Amino acid sequence: MDTSLIDELKIIDTDTHVIEPPDLWTSRVSVKKWGDLVPHIKPDNDGNPAWYAGSNRMLGIAAAAMAGWKEYQPDHPLSLAEAERSAWDPVERLKRMDSDGIHAQVLYPNVAGFGGGNFTSVKEPDLMLDLVRAYNDFLTDYASVAPGRFIPISALPFWDLDAAVKEIERVVDAGHKGVIMTAGPQNWGQPMIEDPHWDRLWATAQEAGLPINFHIGSGDIGDYPRHPGGKHANSASLSCINFINNAQAIVRVICGGVCHRFPDLNIVSVESGVGWIPFILEALDWQWYNCGVPEEHPEYELSPREYFLRQVYGCFWFERDTAMSAIEQLGARNFLYETDYPHPTSMSPGPASIATTPREYLKSALKDLPEETVRLLLQDNAARIYNLDLK
């Protein structure tokens, strides 16, 4: 590849996060009706600003805004004033994108969790729905600052299937390009994602042309074990466990027949890396036939690998050898590029990060790939999946 191609493509960053402004919910949901159950900012026990819903501390206000931060994770900025303004300001975000050579960014949340499960802490169904709708409306407004460059991905009130279906129908009219769904709804007393209970949701998303996005850490991570290695070793451990845990989503949607029943539904494994995917598919193909799945489900017309190649996708950002190996083994059609901005593992150089800039990484990591492959990875795959017009 001629590395100048990196500067010519309209690169689509398929995983970034908007740091939620302090008044996101208090300005959109009735505080008069719900009081302090509406997510708001107040000092925590250490005197630092944090998100609370009632007495439940959810997240430090700038905990997810670590791009360029001076300390290693899990340490983080304690206030928005200490973080990069582009983490939440859309105008500054566009400047950062231009500097990094990024045309468009797919947008994910922080406070609600990566499937919306954090909203369940308020235990008021009407309020829970209001909070989801308020977040999605905020994202609509945020994306309106730069239509076509900010790509909103909707949260879902997954605990109420009827409401979730209605929300998909509502947000697609507002220009949203995908939905984020927890890979572990059983953590909140709901059926697993392969259960036919969810078929109405998958059917609605398929009809609307919205991909289902399973972001890492979308289950209940509160009870993940901590080892005695120290906070930084624990942080590294938790990150890697989350990467691999997304294999469960891929295995379940394939073995549970979701891909078979909904052949036009695109499914994205977000912020999980891709190097492990060839092994999972080889193992799944082996077990598929070794366990007699075709005899049990003669209606399944494809192998696990074939289902994946038809409609499942993975995102990479820091990988080199493993990502290139996955692309070589499976082809380029099923992989997407992300930066994870402004999270601690993002492509954001800083005193406490070994990351290079997106442009530097891409020119180095992809230099030996054909131009057609690079176009698919950085531009065409994402444009197809998220129905983006790049003209």
Image: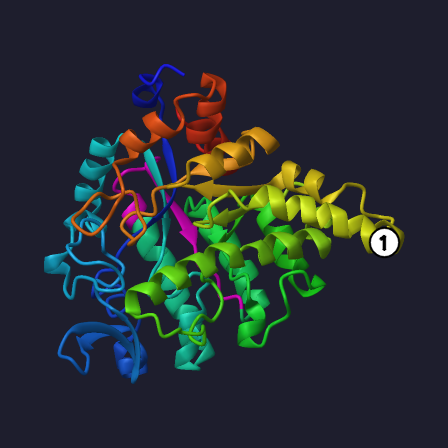
Towards the viewer: 364 or 92:
364
Residue at image x 56%, y 29%? 328
Give the total of numbered labels: 1
Q: Amino acid at mark 1?
A: Gly
Q: Is residue 205 left or right of residue 352?
A: right
Residue 162 in sight? yes
Q: Position of residue 262 (x, y in %)?
A: 69, 47
Crowd around label 1: few <14 · some 14–19 · many ≥20 (10 Å)? few
Residue at image x 63%, y 48%? 280
Q: Which residue is mark 1?
A: 292
Q: Is residue 67 above or below residue 329?
A: below
Residue at image x 36%, y 14%? 2
Magenta run includes residue 147: yes
How is the protein colored in the picture?
A: rainbow
Q: Is residue 116 above or below residue 56?
A: above
Towards the viewer: 145 or 370:
370
Magenta run includes residue 268: no
Q: Quadrant of the N terminus?
A: top left
Residue 216 in sight? no
- Identify the residue at the far left of this view: 81
Write down the region rendered in magenta. Answer: 142-158
Towards the viewer: 182 or 308:
308
